[in-house]
Image (cartoon, grey):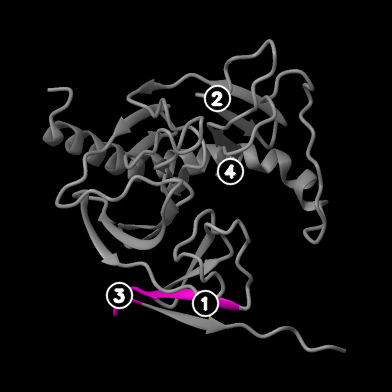
C-alpha cells in the first residue's frame, strides 16, 4: 500500500486538512515567541539590508546555493542546497532542514520523518501554504541529470514529509519553477530540464490533487534563441500571475521592462509594459 495513489492522496489531504487546525495553535505559539523579538526587529530599517547573526556562531548551516527558504511568523526555514565538493568532501547536496528562530536567534537542524525528496535537492520550488510547505521539482548534481516532477508536503508542526500522487495529468519534470496558491489551487509555472525551457502553467487542485495544464509556452520578446525561462519570481494580482526576471537558454537574465502575465480567467499570456519612476 506504500505506493498506492489512493493512500498517498489520502495522506496528503490529511496533511493539508490538519494544517487548518494547527494554524490556530501555531499562531498562538508564534505570537508568544514573536513578541520577544518585536523590539529587536522594530529597530531594523526596512530600506537597508541587515545581517542578523545567530548567537551561536558555530551551530549554523554550511554555505550553499540552490536551496529554498520560507518564513513564518516565528521562524525562517531552509531546505536542501548545493555546495561544490572539495578534495576532502564528497557530499555536495544537503538533504537537511534548518530552522532559524527569530526570538532566540538560533539555528536548529531539524529531524524529519516520512517520504522526502532525496536526489533533487537544488533549484526546487518551495511555498508556504497554511502550516505546511509545498516542495516541487528540483535537480541534483550534476545539474539536469536527475530532474523531479513530484510534489511533497512538509508538515512544519510534525516535521513529517508526504509524497503526493497527481491525478489526471503529470506536470513536466523541471527545476527552477515557480509556485503560487489561490483558493486551494496550486499553480506551477515555468522551469527547465537543462535542455528545454518552458513557461507552461499547471493547475493543481490541492484538496483532490487533480492536475491540469492550463497554460502553454509563449514567445519571448527578449530572447529569440529559445522560448521559456526558469528561476523567475511570481506575484498574483487581480487574477493574473506576473513573472519577474528569470533566465533562458542564452544565460542572459530577462529585464523588468515587459512583464509576462498569465490570466487565470482566460488562461492566456500577455505582456504588461512597466514605467519607471519620474525623474526629479
Q: Nearer the viewer, residue 72 or 8?
A: 8
Which residues, given as a range, are shown in magenta? 258-268
Q: Position of residue 171 (x, y in %)?
A: 28, 50
Q: Of callouts 4 and 2, which one flags the residue occurring earlier in the amino acid sequence? A: 4
Q: Of callouts 2 and 3, which one flags the residue occurring earlier in the amino acid sequence? A: 2
Q: Of callouts 3 and 4, which one flags the residue occurring earlier in the amino acid sequence? A: 4
Q: Position of residue 233 (x, y in %)?
A: 54, 60
Q: Which residue is mark 2?
A: 94
Q: Residues within 10 Å of mark 2 (few under 14, many from 20)?
A: many
What's the residue at 59%, 14% (across, down)?
90
Q: Which residue is mark 3?
A: 267
Number of marks in picture = 4
Q: Nearer the viewer, residue 271 or 250?
A: 250
Q: Of callouts 1 and 2, which one flags the residue occurring earlier in the amino acid sequence? A: 2
Q: Which residue is mark 1?
A: 221
Q: Which one is closest to the eye, mark 1 or mark 2? A: 1
| Image quadrant where residue 3 sits | top left
Q: CA distance from mark 4 to mark 2?
A: 31 Å
Label 4 secondary element: helix
Q: Position of residue 199 (x, y in %)?
A: 40, 63
Amino acid at each position: 500500500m506504500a505506493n498506492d495513489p489512493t493512500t498517498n492522496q489520502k495522506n496528503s489531504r490529511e496533511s493539508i486538512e490538519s494544517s487548518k487546525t494547527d494554524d490556530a495553535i501555531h499562531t498562538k505559539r508564534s505570537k508568544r515567541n514573536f513578541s520577544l523579538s518585536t523590539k529587536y526587529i522594530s529597530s531594523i530599517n526596512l530600506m537597508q539590508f541587515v545581517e542578523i547573526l545567530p548567537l551561536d556562531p558555530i551551530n549554523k548551516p554550511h554555505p550553499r546555493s540552490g536551496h529554498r527558504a520560507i518564513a513564518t511568523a516565528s521562524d525562517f526555514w531552509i531546505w536542501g542546497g548545493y555546495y561544490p565538493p572539495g578534495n576532502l568532501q564528497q557530499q555536495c547536496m544537503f538533504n537537511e532542514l534548518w530552522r532559524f528562530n527569530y526570538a532566540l536567534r538560533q539555528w536548529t537542524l531539524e529531524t524529519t520523518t516520512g517520504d522526502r525528496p532525496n536526489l533533487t535537492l537544488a533549484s526546487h520550488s518551495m511555498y508556504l501554504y497554511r502550516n505546511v510547505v509545498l516542495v516541487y521539482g528540483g535537480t541534483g548534481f550534476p545539474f539536469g541529470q536527475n530532474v523531479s516532477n513530484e510534489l511533497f508536503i512538509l508538515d512544519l508542526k510534525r516535521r513529517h514529509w508526504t509524497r503526493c500522487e497527481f491525478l489526471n495529468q503529470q506536470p513536466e519534470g523541471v527545476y527552477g519553477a515557480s509556485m503560487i496558491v489561490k483558493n486551494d489551487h496550486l499553480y506551477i509555472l515555468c522551469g527547465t530540464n537543462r535542455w528545454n525551457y518552458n513557461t507552461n502553467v499547471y493547475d493543481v487542485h490541492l484538496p483532490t490533487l487533480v492536475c491540469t495544464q492550463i497554460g502553454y509556452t509563449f514567445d519571448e520578446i527578449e530572447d529569440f534563441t529559445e522560448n521559456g525561462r526558469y528561476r523567475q519570481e511570481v506575484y498574483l494580482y487581480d487574477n493574473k500571475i506576473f513573472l519577474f526576471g528569470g533566465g533562458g537558454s542564452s544565460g542572459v537574465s530577462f529585464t523588468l521592462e515587459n512583464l509576462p502575465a498569465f490570466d487565470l480567467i482566460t488562461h492566456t499570456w500577455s505582456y504588461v509594459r512597466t514605467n519607471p519612476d519620474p525623474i526629479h
